[in-house]
Amino acid sequence: MACLFCAIVAGDEPAHVVLEDEHVLGFLDVRPVFKGHALLVPRVHVDTLLELPDELTVPLFSAARRTAAAMTSALGAQGTFVAMNNVVSQSVPHLHVHVVPRTKGDGLRGFFWPRTKYEEGEAAAYAERLRQVLVA
């Protein structure tokens, strides 16, 4: 079976891209916990954190740090939740880091992640706001 995230990296599947560099691609989750929820993936296929080559560790986590910072300035988030599943609850078997914008009282409790949907055209606007900060 083909990897969905590899197809997104290759440009064969659509995504609202927020960050791209030589090693990492960041795009909005299609079922966000909160609007602006981004996924960061290594451009090369890696199943889990345990297989992540050392040379990709800094680029991936630097992208996570930059994305978390962008959520406060671009989206007005008070903070972020950064998470990664490995095998269990990993819906796509391609390593990905979730960066979720947070606001005090937003209702997120523990690891129960209620999901929401974007209205027509809304995902593109959220992606653009993050992209504007991340390319700077």
Image (cartoon, grey):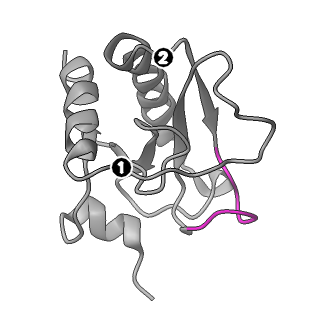
User: Disc 1 marks which amino acid?
Assistant: Tyr
Residue under pointer 2: 77
- Of the residues under marks 1 and 2, which one precedes in the sequence? 2
Q: Which circle, 1 or 2, is nearer the viewer?
A: 1
Residue 86 on image: x %, y %: 70, 57
Residue under pointer 1: 118
Residue 73 on image: x %, y %: 36, 10
Quick check: 62 above or below 91? above
Q: Is residue 27 left or right of residue 93?
A: left
Quick check: 83 above or below 129? below
User: Disc 2 marks which amino acid?
Assistant: Ala
Quadrant placement of the C terminus: top left
Q: Is residue 42 magenta?
A: no
- Residue in front for this viewpoint, 28 or 58: 28
CA–CA distance in space, label 1 to label 2: 17 Å
Q: Is residue 86 magenta?
A: yes
- Residue in front for this viewpoint, 42 or 83: 83
Residue 50 on image: x %, y %: 68, 54
The furthest residue to the right: 110
Q: Residue at x 43, y 38 (%)?
A: 35
